[in-house]
Amino acid sequence: MNIEAHFKDKLSSIMFLEINRETLQKVFKVDLNENIYIPLKAKNIVDTVKAEKNMDKIPVAFFIEGMFYVLGADSKFKFNDCYKSILKNTKDSVPLIKAEIADRVKNKNYEDAYILLKGLLCVEKTEEVYDKTIFIIDRLRIMNNDYRDEELEILEGAEGIDNYALPYFYHAIIEKEREDYEKALFYINNYISKGGEQTLEVTDFKESVKSVVDFDRAKEILNENPKEALKKLIPLMDTFGDHASLYYYIAVGYRLLQNYEKAIYYLNEALSIDSSIVEIVNEMGINYASIGDYQTALAYLRKAFEATRSVEICTNIIMCYLNLGDVDNAKLNYDIAKKLDPNDEIVLQIKDYLEKD
């Protein structure tokens, strides 16, 4: 659902009355130098208005509600600047619309409450109004994720207020849901630095996001700097608990440091959590081959190859057979590897070895 288009469609239920300059001056005490159309959002008196079209019979409050509603529903409406001028110069327009918003919330009409709040923001951009707007739009997003971009727009506007923490918390939640943990950590840190209350919920949220960020960063540097990667990965065992992938990456780090026994220990832990992850099975084979236990390595590598038909695993199998002096089985698997990818770099190296005269 396109929320912007949806809000504009809701304006079809609003009646617009053409008001001349003299009437504007009389009713709203403003001089706009033009006739404009004023919105009326009051179903209970629409029929009367259609019949009589008499401004004297219509309470000004109904026009105030209509103008706030149009401001919130369509930011590009032709007469929006006129409505802002009228509302800013109309006594009690803000208290009146706040009461209307409270009534919508009480009746769980959250969408109309949000549209009126968005209109109110055009007149009064305060933390109080943003607090209520964020609360309502977040509820709408939870019920329907189509409102996500709408909420982000509100949050970005609120973030323009100095030392206003609340929008950063809700922004962090959305980024976490989008699995952009770097951004989620950025926004939750901003929330805290701007004085946001550090409740248990906030602390837990930050720790959960930071753990994922540390995990991702460790994976990025694992091949180039396994020692530093392990410094990030090992503490995560307390946070992640039984997480097979975490044990797998710790094992890879130890293998890269040539600590194969520790690597095998963590791979066994990973397999005890989830024995179906092929990468763990393959890694186990690589580590056993690294310590010269080629028979055990082959058992794991064959199992991984059956699941993936990967040329990389197939070449590992070939190298195990060659190290065992079993040239026949090495050649059998070499034939398989050639069919999988004859141009693979390792396959070509094995070819030079096995096919030499």
Image (cartoon, rainbow, N blue to C red):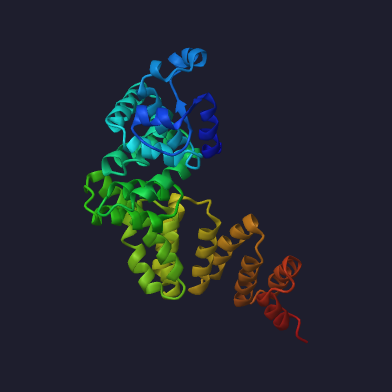
Vertical comparison of 62 with 298: above or below: above
Give the tally of numbered discs: 0
Q: What is the residue that sits farthest to the front in this orientation?
A: 22
Q: What is the residue that sits farthest to the right in this orientation?
A: 357
Which image quarter is the N terminus in? top right
Closer to us: 66 or 100? 66
Residue 320 image point, x, y percent: 60, 72
Q: Is residue 347 left or right of residue 134?
A: right
Which image quarter is the C terminus in? bottom right
Q: Residue at x 36, y 19 (%)?
A: 59
Residue 167 image point, x, y percent: 33, 47
Closer to us: 355 or 84? 84
Residue 216 image point, x, y percent: 42, 61
Closer to us: 42 or 305? 42
Q: Is residue 110 visible?
A: no
Q: Is residue 203 left or right of residue 278?
A: left
Q: Is residue 47 left or right of residue 62?
A: right
Q: Residue at x 39, y 45 (%)?
A: 154
Vertical comparison of 347 with 267: above or below: below
Vertical comparison of 342 with 271: above or below: below
Q: Is residue 11 visible?
A: yes
Residue 226 image point, x, y percent: 41, 72
Q: Residue at x 38, y 54 (%)?
A: 184
Quadrant for residue 132, please give it.
top left
